[in-house]
Amino acid sequence: MNGNVWADAWLWIWIVLIVVGFALLVKGADWFVEGAAGLAGKMRIPALVIGLTVVAFGTSFPELAVSVTGAIQKSTDIAIGNVVGSNIVNILLILGVSALIRKLPVQKVSLWLDIPVLLLASALLVGLGAWGRAIEWWDGLILLVVFSGYMTLLFLNARKEQKRAREGGMSETPVQEKPPKNKYDAWKRKMLGKVWVLILLTLVGLGMVVGGGTLLVDGARYVATAFNVPERIIGLTVVAIGTSLPELVTSVVAAAKGETDIAVGNIIGSNIFNIFLVAGVSSLFCPLTFTISGNLIDALVAFDAAALLYVCAFLGKGKLTRAAGAVMVACFIGYYVYLFLA
């Protein structure tokens, strides 16, 4: 490493811009989801559809922006590293730390549907990447087609559960809206009831995510060059953890408060979106190169993380215990030690 690298003014500027990029990604995704969900509600789209599409898509929006930007700029190691790295962080670090705080219940639907689909997605990523040493556009189409099938299955299953609940006399009761906390809260609710505000919020949120993704990728490339660190490592660490920060904070806080009902399902869903949607769409812009000694190993680690999650949930009889959390965190630390020492 060059001893004078820290004296480079541009390095500090780009580090600041990376932080700004993260902030834009997180807040932009939040605004986009709030605006899009509000518009969908105004258009009388069922809450079920909104939850399965807009909200679920929003959790992977930062990863999508970063990976697509990386693919467009031919930084494919950042693009694929972000996808694989985020999945590893989500399971081994986020679920691991959360399980150390409190046992996490794993819903039955996750055991028989979501985790097997995640294993399939991870296996497809490994297989398609190893087959042609890259995820080409036609591989991306395969991922997107399978993703469409999974979303259709989710929708049909949710509709079936709704029908079963209605037939059992469990009619949905309207959620009582809490009174506004203060004048600002009341004003915000009033503004969010206006269509033009929701449209503006959606567009501004989209712009923030795109801008934040661009800053993050450009900054990551500059820092990688300055420190002679491969873009793959930057994508697997700084970028992956950064784009997973919302899930990390949300899951850890939820675990501390005992609100763990859907924590595991949300993480699994985010990982499925990352592979099928993020990698699939990114590959349409530029082939995502796979190297045997690099990206392929990382993808195998992501597959192993998903398999470990399934084994831990099965042995824990539908729960992730503290012992499982300890194993996950230990595996995460071991993987990062490997990254920087290999």
Image: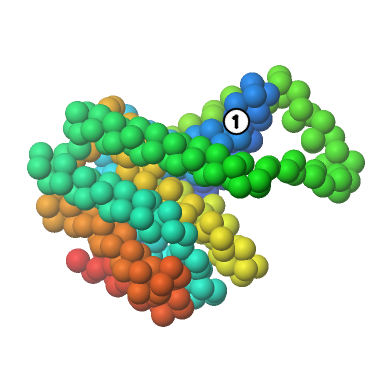
Q: Which of 37/291 is in front?
A: 37
- The residue lying at 20 percent from left, 37 percent from top is 135
Q: Which of 41/326 is in front?
A: 41
Image quarter (top left, top right, bottom left or bottom right) of the N terminus: bottom left
Q: Which of 249/41 is in front?
A: 41
**Is residue 329 shown above or below 143?**
below
Q: Secondary structure at mark 1?
A: loop
- The residue lying at 68 percent from left, 42 percent from top is 172
**Is residue 93 shown above or below 194?**
below
Q: Residue 245's spot in the image, x, y percent?
A: 51, 54
> Dot 1 corresponds to which residue?
46
Q: Is residue 232 left or right of residue 65?
A: left
Toward the bottom, the furthest residue is: 323
Q: Residue 169's spot in the image, x, y percent?
A: 66, 46
Q: Amino acid at mark 1?
A: Pro
Image quarter (top left, top right, bottom left or bottom right) of the C terminus: bottom left
Q: Is residue 310 left or right of residue 265?
A: left
- The residue lying at 12 percent from left, 52 percent from top is 292
Q: Is residue 48 visible?
A: yes
